[in-house]
Amino acid sequence: MCGEAVDGLDVIHQTKDLKPDVVLLDFRMPVLTGIEAAPIIKGAFPQVRIVLFTLYEHEISKTMATAAQIDLVVSKPDGLETLLESIQDLMEPGRQV
């Protein structure tokens, strides 16, 4: 199942409805940022992998990402191919979140 949300709150609602394996967030989203939405999603669905795909990678410290329970941060300038490869690596069987 695939969904598209209009803001951070919508991401939470769609995650509850669609129960995806991976949620792709951005750092800057209306209503709730990716940093704000991620721990809410993880609290309800700890098995969901959360990827932050953002232009603002340099503003996000490893500590901030870990505290927000984000599994992976990928820079938008690195492109979609890097994003897809990174998600495939993240989803490898046996990889711990």
Image: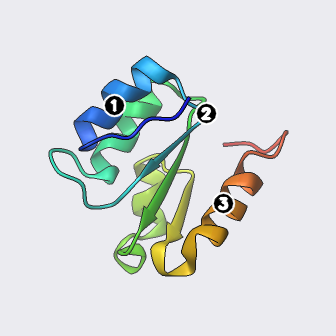
Disc 3 crowd rating (10 Å Cα; few below 14, some 14-19, many 20+) is few
Q: Position of residue 4 (x, y in %)?
A: 38, 40
Disc 1 crowd rating (10 Å Cα; few below 14, some 14-19, many 20+) is some
| Quarter placement of the C terminus | top right
Please name the residue shown 24% across and 44% down the image.
7
Q: Determine whether 94 is above or below 68 in the image.
A: above
Q: Which of marks 3 and 1 is nearer the N terminus?
A: 1
Q: Position of residue 32 (x, y in %)?
A: 21, 45
- Discs 3/2, front: 3
Q: Where is residue 11 in the image (x, y as percent from the top left)?
A: 34, 36
Quarter of the rendering containing residue 54? bottom left
Disc 2: which residue = 21
Disc 1: which residue = 12
Contact flag, marks 3 and 1 (Cβ < 8 Å): no
* Between 74 and 96, the one nearer to me in the picture: 74
Contact flag, marks 2 and 1 (Cβ < 8 Å): no
On screen, residue 15 versus residue 1, left or right, reads: left
Spatial CA span between label 2 and label 1:
14 Å
Please name the residue shown 47% across and 73% down the image.
76
Q: Position of residue 52 (x, y in %)?
A: 46, 58
- Discs 3/1, front: 3
Q: What's the residue type where badge 1 is placed? A: Ile
Which of the labelled discs sits on residue 40, or is there none? none
Which of the labelled discs sits on residue 84, or is there none? 3
Quarter of the rendering containing residue 48? top right
Q: Earlier in the sequence, mark 2 or mark 1?
A: 1
Q: What's the residue type where badge 3 is placed? A: Leu
Spatial CA span between label 3 and label 1:
22 Å
